[in-house]
Amino acid sequence: MNELTRTALQETAARTTTEQASPVLLVPASSIARTLSVSPRYIHLLGEQGKIPVCRFGKGCVRFSPSAVFAALGIDAA
């Protein structure tokens, strides 16, 4: 491997490790409901209506991103 190729690989590896996206936290409806003092069914209803973003995994597994839900509802998550 020549020096130019080695340098290019090192730069790519450094760029890849520093630019990795942070993992997205996905939680069940009960967690969001507890935070908002509503029922989990109401959270599912908002998801079905398209008012909050939903991540569906198969037929019955539904998860929510707290930051995305709070942003969709106009709530400051801080």
Image (cartoon, rainbow, N blue to C red):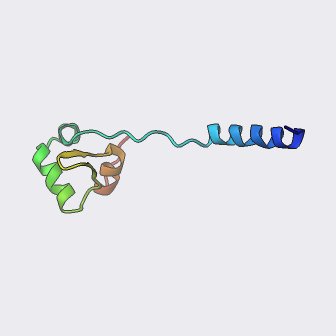
Residue 61 image offset from top left, x and y in percent: 21, 44
User: What residue appears at the point 45 percent right and 39 percent down from the top-left corner?
Assistant: 23
Residue 37: x percent and y percent?
Answer: 15, 41
Could you tell me which quadrant the C terminus lies in? top left
Q: Residue at x 18, y 59 (%)?
A: 48
Q: Residue at x 71, y 43 (%)?
A: 12
Picture coordinates of residue 53 (x, y %)? 29, 55
Instruction: Name the foreground residue: 9 vs 14.
Output: 9
Q: Position of residue 21 (x, y in %)?
A: 52, 43
Q: Nearer the viewer, residue 15 or 76?
A: 15
Camera-side residue of 59 and 2 = 2
Farthest-out residue, front: 1
User: Is 72 in front, or is 7?
Assistant: 7
Residue in view at x 21 percent, y 56 percent:
47
Residue at the outermost right position:
3
Quadrant where the image shows the N terminus: top right
- Report the number of numbered marks: 0
* Drawn side of residue 17 relative to residue 31, left or right: right
Horizontal arrangement in the rendering, residue 24 relative to residue 39 (left or right): right
